[in-house]
Image: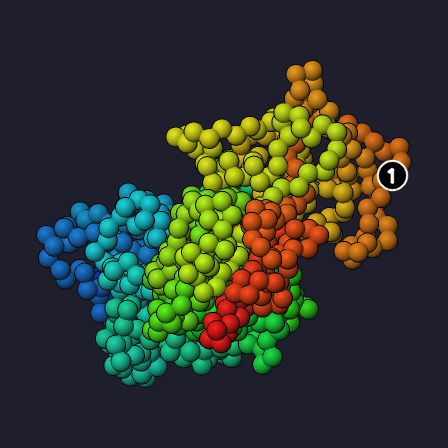
């Protein structure tokens, strides 16, 4: 019998128990474990010895009460006795057998998640006792689940804390912290040891592999008997079956079949409390406990929350607001997908990405296959994952949306798009050469998609762009805090360049050369016009030409394309103290959120109600969080200037909604007598854009409609044979994905046209 001499609650459901076991205390080494059997009928529970106190002959155990057996163990009082404590078992950590000189030359990183903090402690303590430095990362869902912080601080100077909700230390999980240390702090490690929930160890192993660092993990949670007798802890290591208790518990993480381990852990769900854990995890959308989720549960109603910069911080910088999912979060969210037989999400996507297929591959951790698949289906997954209005497209059709949150398809697309870039997974290079040439005018989403598709079919493709940068609105319109240029847009375009598409900047079609020149002089067999709709509209009200009134396009181009907000860039940008943005679309949100980052107080004036705001819901939500004031059901009447010709106010009128108009939205009508003056010194007009007339006015026989949009059929064929068009230049200002859809359809039509030419 083994006496309990101390018991302390360390955190939520986590207990420290000191137990008299003198023989074990004397012989136990870091990495070893004991088996505790609380009473005669109790289950054998493997627990790592996290510390020893030789004078009293005690060992310290840390227990997470997650199931029937562990709850029973922690219910024992001080002075009570455990029936059995067996050990020390398993092999000690391999590193303690290495020569000290070698250890001194190497840099070790120990990573602990949740209850894995306890078994990591003796490893770090051993390092400290031998005068060796190491880095330690400990993480949990939130601060209340962390423990041993003071104890760690006594034995290491390099303790890094990560919590999913940011309640202590770094906001993110241990893998994010590792990534940060390596990429931002320049840490180099010779070996990583990770202990924690199976799912965490799986992803730390994957990350370590990506970083080229050997990674050891401890599978002690798999064990039952602990002596090699039952074989319940068998595990596939590099294709060979090993027993965790005999051959481990530490193994090379890159060789472990984690999925199989997790699968087997579920075998006893109905009796050992892992079921309880699983339910708790599903409720909380988190997986970081020992045990892991192992079988298909009913999907939780809420999606896995995505981490973001806090509003107070982000309104002072231009860094990306949303951090996106990490691998664990992506897998967890992917598990919510029902993989419908008749997937409506695909119908909701204008480029018909095989959504359930790539999500299913993410769910299985087959990121490389998911990445290859998405790269086949779309030219810009990392872009679309960030800026598409998914709520009205793919996610709007997701059946889970009927009773809860739809699957976060956009965030999963973003995750796998980013992953594919980091891991150099690109679309297949063309294997055939068709020998015909296509010119693409404009390098926005429509032009890029069409170019990629045609190139993959084997055509020679050249993209002509008027600006000095490629990407269209993606570079000059959408701000860095929503869509990073260097890390996302450029590499996405680079993947298209690498397929063999030629890009020429600073060529204004209609000026530098015409569409006719392209076909007659430069012998292109077809032309795709994707020049967008970059011409800003104004309201034609009094005072619109005062100093301090600008279009959103001007304001954003100065900021995003010409980097006026960065010190060494020379382009100036005027920013008022009290800025009013007129409009309610994505462009208005971007202008408002840029102005607030530049230090202004910002108001949005929009003539309809919140329900009709055309901007993506996420952008409206973010704008509000950042402190932007929404003057809804309000319309500008005139802009008022001071005696020097600068804006000093804007007269507005309140509106109410009446019957639906031709757009299907309820028509706003003024409320007589509700006029008021809004105090403002800058007005940013963001009420839409139109196509630039340059191309159609210089191209013979190209039909346009009343709005100046090129007339094209569903496949993009225009009134001129061999000339196709798509994106905003045809539809008027719309969305990235619709432009991409048009580019994809046009590529098919161009292929057909050229094959029959
Ligand atoms: P563009 O992206 O406009 O690209 C056209 C390209 O053609 C430009 O690079 C232009 O310089 C070039 N060009 C023009 N004329 C010529 C010429 N004569 N010769 C050579 N090149 C020429 N959509 C979303 O889905 N989500 C969003 O969050 C979102 N936010 C937006 C925010 C802003 C500020 C703006 C302005 C738009 C936003 N949109 C958003 C809309 C979306 O960006 C556009 O619908 C999409 O970019 C249209 O793609 P496109 O390829 O047709 O044209």
Instruction: Report the front residue among 739 and 372.
Output: 739
The image quadrant where one finds the N terminus is bottom left
Q: Residue at x 68, y 68 (%)?
A: 403
Instruction: Report the front residue among 191 and 364.
Output: 364
Position of residue 27 relative to residue 630, above or below, is below
Can residue 675 be spotted in the picture? yes
| Count of numbered marks | 1
Disc 1: which residue: 671
Q: Residue at x 89, y 36 (%)?
A: 672
Position of residue 211 relative to residue 365, above or below, is above
Q: Residue 15's quadrant in the figure?
A: bottom left
Q: Residue at x 39, y 75 (%)?
A: 259
**Residue 334 placement (x, y as % from top left):** 50, 68
Instruction: Report the front residue among 666 and 701.
Output: 701
Mark 1 packing: few (<14 Cα in 10 Å), some, or many (20+)?
some
Q: Secondary structure at mark 1?
A: loop
**Residue 302 placement (x, y as % from top left):** 60, 63
Position of residue 433 relative to residue 552, above or below, is below
| Disc 1 within 8 angstroms of ligand 1 (CB) | no
């Amino acid at each position: 019998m083994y006496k309990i001499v101390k018991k302390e609650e360390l955190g939520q459901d986590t207990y420290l128990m000191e137990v008299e076991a003198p023989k074990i205390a004397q012989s136990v080494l870091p990495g070893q474990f004991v088996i505790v059997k609380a009473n005669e009928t109790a289950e054998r529970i493997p627990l790592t010895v996290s510390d020893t106190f030789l004078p009293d002959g005690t060992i310290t155990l840390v227990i997470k009460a997650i199931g029937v057996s562990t709850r029973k163990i922690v219910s024992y009082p001080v002075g009570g006795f455990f029936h059995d404590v067996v050990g020390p078992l398993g092999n000690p950590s391999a590193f303690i057998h290495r020569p000290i000189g070698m250890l001194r030359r190497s840099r070790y990183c120990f990573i602990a998640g949740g209850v894995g903090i306890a078994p990591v402690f003796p490893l770090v303590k051993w390092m400290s006792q031998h005068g060796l430095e190491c880095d330690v990362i400990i993480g949990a869902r939130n601060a209340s689940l962390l423990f041993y912080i003071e104890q760690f601080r006594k034995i290491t100077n390099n303790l890094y804390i990560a919590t999913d909700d940011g309640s202590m230390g770094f906001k993110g999980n241990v893998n994010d912290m590792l990534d940060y240390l390596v990429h931002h702090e320049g840490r180099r490690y010779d070996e990583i040891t990770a202990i924690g929930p199976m799912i965490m160890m799986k992803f730390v192993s994957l990350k370590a592999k990506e970083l080229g660092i050997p990674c050891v993990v401890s599978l002690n949670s798999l064990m039952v008997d602990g002596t090699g007798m039952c074989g319940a802890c068998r595990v596939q290591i590099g294709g060979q079956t090993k027993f965790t208790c005999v051959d481990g518990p530490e193994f090379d993480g890159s060789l472990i079949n984690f999925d199989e381990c997790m699968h087997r852990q579920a075998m006893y769900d109905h009796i050992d409390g892992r079921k309880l854990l699983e339910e708790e995890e599903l409720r909380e959308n988190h997986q970081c406990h020992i045990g892991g989720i192992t079988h298909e549960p009913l999907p939780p109603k809420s999606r896995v929350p995505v981490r973001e910069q806090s509003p107070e911080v982000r309104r002072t910088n231009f860094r990306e607001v949303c951090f996106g999912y990490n691998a664990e979060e992506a897998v967890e969210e992917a598990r919510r997908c029902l993989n419908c037989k008749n997937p409506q999400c695909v119908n909701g996507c204008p480029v018909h990405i095989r959504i359930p297929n790539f999500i299913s591959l993410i769910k299985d951790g087959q990121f490389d296959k998911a990445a290859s698949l998405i790269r086949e289906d779309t030219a810009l997954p990392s872009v679309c994952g960030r800026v598409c209005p998914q709520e009205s497209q793919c996610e709007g059709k997701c059946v889970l949306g009927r009773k809860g949150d739809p699957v976060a398809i956009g965030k999963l697309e973003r995750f796998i798009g980013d992953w594919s870039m980091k891991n150099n997974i690109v679309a297949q290079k063309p294997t055939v050469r068709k020998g015909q040439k296509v010119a693409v005018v404009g390098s926005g989403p429509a032009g890029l998609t069409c170019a990629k598709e045609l190139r993959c079919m084997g055509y020679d493709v050249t993209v002509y762009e008027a600006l000095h940068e490629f990407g269209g609105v993606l570079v000059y319109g959408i701000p860095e805090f929503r869509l990073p240029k260097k890390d996302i847009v450029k590499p996405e375009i680079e993947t298209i360049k690498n397929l063999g598409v030629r890009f020429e900047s600073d060529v204004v079609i209609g000026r530098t050369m015409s569409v006719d020149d392209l076909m007659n002089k430069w012998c292109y067999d077809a032309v795709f016009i994707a020049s967008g709709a970059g011409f800003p509209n104004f309201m034609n009200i009094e005072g619109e030409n005062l100093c301090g009134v600008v279009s959103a396009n001007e304001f954003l181009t100065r900021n995003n394309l010409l980097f006026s907000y960065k010190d060494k860039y020379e382009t100036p940008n005027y920013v008022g103290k009290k800025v009013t943005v007129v409009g309610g679309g994505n462009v208005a949100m971007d202008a408002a959120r840029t102005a607030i980052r530049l230090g202004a107080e910002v108001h949005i004036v929009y003539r309809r109600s919140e329900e009709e705001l055309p901007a993506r819901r996420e952008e409206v939500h973010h704008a509000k969080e950042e402190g932007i004031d929404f003057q809804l059901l309000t319309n500008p009447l005139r802009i008022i200037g001071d005696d020097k010709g600068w804006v000093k106010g804007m007269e507005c009128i309140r509106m109410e909604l009446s019957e639906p108009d031709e757009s299907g939205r309820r028509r706003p009508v003024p409320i007589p007598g509700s006029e008021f003056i809004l105090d403002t010194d800058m007005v940013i007009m963001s009420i839409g854009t139109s196509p630039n007339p340059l191309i159609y006015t210089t191209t013979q026989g190209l039909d346009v409609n009343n709005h100046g949009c090129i007339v094209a059929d569903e496949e993009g064929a225009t009134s001129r044979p061999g000339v196709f068009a798509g994106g905003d230049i045809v539809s008027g200002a719309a969305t990235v994905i619709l432009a991409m859809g048009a580019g994809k359809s046009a590529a098919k039509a161009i292929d057909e046209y050229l094959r029959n030419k």
